[in-house]
Amino acid sequence: MERAVLIGGEAGEGIKEAANLLAKVLVNLGYSVFTYHDYPSLIKGGHNFSIVRFSNEPVGAPVKKVDYIVALDSRSLSLHKENAKEGATWIVDSELPGDIKLPFRKMAKGVKRSSAILGALLKAFRIEEEQGLAVLRELPDYEENEKIFLEAYRLGREVEEIVEVEGIKGDYISGSEGIALGAVDGGLNIYIAYPMTPASPVLHFLASHKRKLGIKVIQPENEIGVINMVLGAAYAGGRAMTGTSGGGFALMTETLSLAGMSETPVVIYEAQRGAPSTGVPTYTEQADLLFVLFAGHGDFPRIVLAPSDARECYLFSRKAMNLAWKFQTPVILLSSKNVAESFFTQEIEREKVIEEPELWSGEGEYRRYKITENGISPLAFPGTKGAVVKVNSYEHDELGITTEEPLKINLMKEKRERKRRAIEEFVRDDKEAVSVGGDLNSKRVLITWGENWGVCCEVGEELGFKAVKPNYLEPFPLERLKDEIKGAEETVVVELSVSGQFERLLKLYGIKADKNFRKYDTRPIFKEELKAFLGGRDGA
């Protein structure tokens, strides 16, 4: 059993809140829910809509066609005709034409309309009132929301029965929340960031829960200040992290090279949006890929991880915190709007996993950049008895003292290169380096990365395609990827980039696809679109 509900209206009318409230009720009933939020970069006005897709089987991808449409204004009526399946039920404001009419605008103002929308939908689904009241109790002004909800429930009309199922156990969680909680469970001490959509929800979440989580949260004046503060905190021994999008990351790239030269462990969360420049701030894309892989001047090792859903956001964020300190190098979590701001139903077992870095023993003279076999030098922090902790943006010797001597320069460059090889060896042994899904026995293969994973797995399973994705983009898990696509009779690269950045990366490693599916209108790949491209039915 699967259904999809679209809720549309102006910003400020409780569209997103209504979708999340409905989703929480459905999760409580045992359904797997995926929620996609679509909104322009306006504080008030403009057109917003959310699509709540739910099923008694796992779902993790957006769909375009829906069974129910809630329209609060005439614009929603006209815009979403293309989203309506044949026989779709329209639940509308009483002044509009539709199947079920309720006076939404008269019943409540602003975000409190979400309670009215929830009441109308639960009545349509014959879901008991108490299920809705249970999630409303988590909101402020419960009594007023309860009154609005009950009135809408009374005025609504039953359509079909959505019953409790033996479904998917899990949390209703966004990618942003996964990033935040994973970092904390990886030992995060301090989060330093400047707001930039779609990375801002991580900043908001951590700031709202900082006391409970036991961390510090700071918002400096700009992204240049941010990344330098992160380096300063890490130099002092704080496990620090920041989050931004493409424009903010561009401002951080000089300091990224400083982190590489100074071998400072930092984690940068980069949530892609429509680009270049200001681009389309509240929508999605995968066009920062090559920029992130090659940003910064000079040679230095880095790690780039790309989560695809909330669970991976949690696991990879926790891993990123530990890898940064293990290898004393920048680690970048490369996500996108549709991962960051979509909500998934996934079981996430939280566990603190904090791996301590190799520390100075206290014997002899402390050498910050001690030459080692694996390129990793023991750490000490300012204030450590007997240690002078000197880091340097210039090329330096083992003590951290500036040098221009060719022999010493070679020694340091070779040291950092050995570290790169140590990271590559770690990635080769990581069982999570590559994911596979879809039809595992198929000779037709979809190769993708990041947010497209859910849609590739679902469509692959239905149409007979194996889905493969690298989770590390640097170092690239080439051997593992080649093993998974070995013997393929047809390969298709799926990505959100007009120039095919991911396909270009694959070619760099000697992998050439037979076809490509590229979308670049800054919206996610809807399930129906990929099915149509691959020759399946439309799914409408």
Image (tube, grey):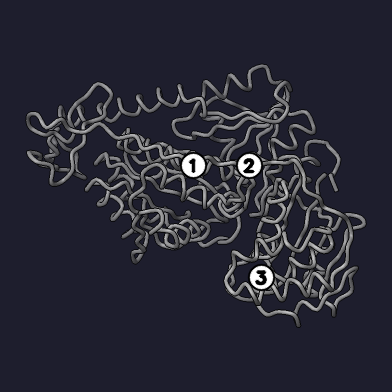
CA gap between label 3 and label 2 equals 32 Å
Q: In the figure, is residue 247 to the left or right of 457?
A: left
* Relative vertical location of residue 300 with respect to residue 266 in this rendering, above or below: above
- Dividing the picture into quadrants, the one containing residue 90 is bottom right
Amino acid type of the residue tagged 1 in the rendering: Arg
> Can residue 204 be seen in this snapshot?
yes
Q: What element does badge 3 sit on?
A: loop
Q: Which residue is mark 3?
A: 14
Residue density around tag 2, few if under 14, some if 14–19, many if 20 or more, within 10 Å: many
Pointer 2 or 1: first along the chain:
1
Q: Which residue is mark 2?
A: 495
- Look at discs 1 and 3 and give the one toward the viewer: 1
Residue found at x 62% / y 50% = 172
Camera-nearest residue between 458 and 102: 102
Labels 1 and 3 touching (C-beta < 8 A): no
Q: What element does badge 2 sit on?
A: strand
Where's residue 82, x and y in %?
Answer: 83, 59
Determine which of the numbered discs, if any, sits on residue 350 in the image.
Answer: 1
Amino acid type of the residue tagged 2 in the rendering: Glu
Where's residue 258, x and y in %?
Answer: 27, 46
Residue density around tag 3, few if under 14, some if 14–19, many if 20 or more, within 10 Å: many
Residue density around tag 1, few if under 14, some if 14–19, many if 20 or more, within 10 Å: few
- Dividing the picture into quadrants, the one containing residue 507 is top right
Residue found at x 77% / y 48% = 164
> Can residue 82 be seen in this snapshot?
no
Pointer 1 or 3: first along the chain:
3
